[in-house]
Amino acid sequence: MFGTFGSEIILHDTSEQYNVYKAHISRSAMGDFTLSADKKKMVISDESGAVKLIDVKTSKVLTNYKAQNLDNVYYVAYNDGVIISGGQDRKVGVYGATKEDYYIKSDFMVYCVGVSPDGNTGIYSSGEENNLQLFNTRTKQKGDILVAHKTPINQIKFINNNELFSIGNRHDIFYWKID
């Protein structure tokens, strides 16, 4: 699966070396996309703040979410039906965790987000100090702040519900174990 800044997605068959499809998804430049764990669905965001859930096999838009971000979405994460977006407008959008989608206001642009495999724990880059803020996606309650990065965080990956990695711009890699 490839995504372009022109907001096209391309499903490429590597064994046969051909494009299964090339689909134009949005009028705005793509911000980020991510695949579900089973690789059957993908989430796409763009500079308008829009977030879409797409069927990978057909490229059909399954859900157009009401945008929680009002501006450029830098990063999206997706696990167990929960989508988290982070963007230039200093908001963390949360979709599918509760009956109504919501956002959390941050004090700085949100460059990176993550969500645990069970969808219960969210995390986002927070503040100019390059910290990571944990929160419960169901209750919206903020939890611990993870402090150590010296540069902006550009990657957050959970390896299970209680362990994750975060990566900074200088390729600093941190391993975290959370309760």
Image (spheres, helix red, strand yellow):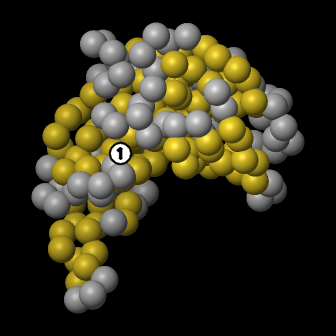
Q: Residue farthest to the bottom? A: 16
Towards the viewer: 139 or 109: 139
- The residue sitting at 39% across, 61% down in the picture is 4
- In percent of width and height, residue 50 lies at 35, 33
Quarter of the image with the N terminus is bottom left
Q: Residue farthest to the front? A: 179
- The residue sitting at 77% across, 58% down in the picture is 171
Q: Is residue 9 left or right of residue 144?
A: left
Report how many numbered discs are placed on residues in the image: 1
Residue that badge 1 annotates: 44
- In percent of width and height, residue 144 lies at 70, 20
Q: Is residue 139 left or right of residue 39?
A: right
Q: Is residue 88 in view from this perspective? A: no
Residue 51 placement: quadrant: top left
Residue 129 placement: quadrant: top right
Q: Is residue 136 in view from this perspective? A: yes
Which amino acid lies under the numbered mark 1 shown in the image of this protein? Ile
Instruction: Name the secondary structure under disc 1.
Output: strand
Towards the viewer: 114 or 130: 114
Quarter of the image with the C terminus is top right
- The residue sitting at 68% across, 46% down in the picture is 166
Q: Is residue 35 left or right of residue 19?
A: right
- Figure check: 164 above or below 89: below
